[in-house]
Image (tube, grey):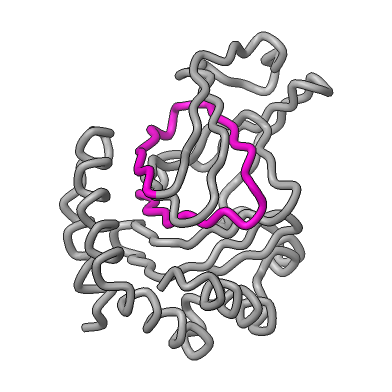
Amino acid sequence: MNEIESAAEQLAWIDWNDINDVETICRGFFARLAAEPGIVRARLEALPNRPELLGLCEHYDILDKIVLFNDSDTGIRVRLHVFLPGYFDRPHNHRWSYASRILRGHYRHYLFGNAELDDQIDPAKLPVLHVREEPIDTTYALHHSMVHAVVAEPFTVSLVVRGPAVKDRFLVTDRKTGQAWWQFGAAQESPEESQRKQMTPVRLQEAIERLTQWELF
């Protein structure tokens, strides 16, 4: 068993309906990876030869998602997020609950609460209930029902543990245009949509070189 698989064994005990449990167990997982950076470094070096993981890595204009671990039985996934210049979120919820630890940079986090969302909602009526900075070494967990948005400093890096999907879609809202729309998981995407966001081996190598330069692992 690879070291990251061994470290991730504790994630199987998470009660994803208990966000305190999510945060507590993931905090321990993040602490182990911080104490043993070679675990992540070894997985990054192996990724080009792990097509089942490389195929899950995604590249967008403003975000890279690098998948380090995926358990298809439990739906648990461990990713590195690299926020690129210009990154910002529109208010949205998620298909799954997750925990995150900030490794580099920081972002401003806007929390709108557990709102009842549908595509007829007026985004301008979503009140910001909590604003916080997420600096280096911050760990937090977010329930899938929470509506939130992030504005990240360029090249902020976070380590994310996402739980199993509990719904097949999530809602994205735009407070400037007043629009709202559903987005679906990868299983319901067209081949063209999937291909557009898939990270190429060249892009992966560029991302790994950045992470190495920043001496995160």
At 59% from the left and 80% from the top, the residue drawn is 209
Q: Within the magenta stretch, is there residue 74?
A: no
Q: Main secondary structure of the magenta part?
A: strand
- The residue furthest right is 177
Residue 71, image quadrant: bottom left
The residues colored magenta run 137-163
23 left or right of 137? left
Tell me where residue 39 appears, x and y as whole percent: 31, 77
Name the residue nearer the viewer: 170 or 79: 79
137 left or right of 126? left
Residue 7, image quadrant: bottom left
At 54% from the left and 51% from the top, the residue drawn is 105
Q: Is residue 40 above or below residue 118?
A: below
Tell me where residue 26 appears, x and y as whole percent: 26, 50
Q: Is residue 215 above or below residue 61?
A: below
For the N terminus, the quadrant is: bottom left
Q: Within the magenta stretch, is there residue 162?
A: yes
